[in-house]
Amino acid sequence: MSMKINRLAMFGPAFVLALLIAGGTAANAQVSREGTVTGPAGNTVTTQGTTSCADGKCTSTGTVTGPAGNQIQRSGTATRTGSGVQRSGTVTGPRGNTATTQGSTSCADGKCTSTGTATGPRGNTIKRSSSVTRN
């Protein structure tokens, strides 16, 4: 089984937001991205989106279109804080069901810690946390 992955599709919105927010004091920035993933049976999924940043806050929107034409819409914001980033977002599926996400990332002394929650359309919530330490 092999998959062809367009490299632009590999860079998700969180990565783009982090790059733009970490970019320092630039007043405004905007990035548009698109990508295609082709599965082993030749089915394709396309992604497209835009991220805009100004004054320490980034807003991202995008669409994922599946092989049958069904679409998922997503949007989110990330805001720079004193020690990291606060983020929130929504994902709406093809039938109108919506999931929400929120979380934060903070860094100090060579270690970044990220926590977050995702709540599905029926109210079920998952929590996650991770950390990365520089050697």
Image (cartoon, helix red, strand yellow):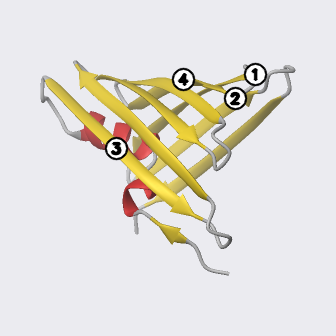
- Secondary structure of the residue carrying tag 1 is loop
Question: Mark 1 or mark 4: which is in front?
Answer: 1
Q: Where does label 2 land, which residue? A: 93
Q: What residue type is labelled 1?
A: Asn
Spatial separation of the CA atoms under disc 3 and disc 4: 20 Å
Spatial separation of the CA atoms under disc 1 and disc 2: 5 Å
Upstream in sequence: badge 4 or badge 2:
4
- Secondary structure of the residue carrying tag 4 is strand
Spatial separation of the CA atoms under disc 3 and disc 2: 20 Å
Tag 2: Cα neighbours inside 10 Å, few (<14), some, or many (≥20)? some
Q: Name the side, left or right, on which 47 lies relative to 32.
A: right
Q: Do the residues labelled 3 and 4 touch (CB within 8 Å)?
A: no
Q: Which amino acid does label 4 sit on?
A: Ser
Q: Name the side, left or right, on which 90 lies relative to 112.
A: right
The circle on residue 70 is none
Tag 3: Cα neighbours inside 10 Å, few (<14), some, or many (≥20)? some
Residue 104 point in image, percent of width and height:
52, 31
Upstream in sequence: badge 1 or badge 4:
4
The picture quadrant where one finds residue 14 is: top left
Q: Where does label 3 land, which residue? A: 33
Q: Are marks 1 and 2 in contact (CB under 8 Å)?
A: yes
Screen quadrant of the N terminus: bottom right
Q: Which amino acid does label 2 sit on?
A: Gly
Q: Where does label 1 land, which residue? A: 97
Q: Where does label 4 land, which residue? A: 88
- Secondary structure of the residue carrying tag 2 is loop
Tag 1: Cα neighbours inside 10 Å, few (<14), some, or many (≥20)? few
Residue 115 point in image, percent of width and height:
61, 37
The picture quadrant where one finds residue 73 is: top right
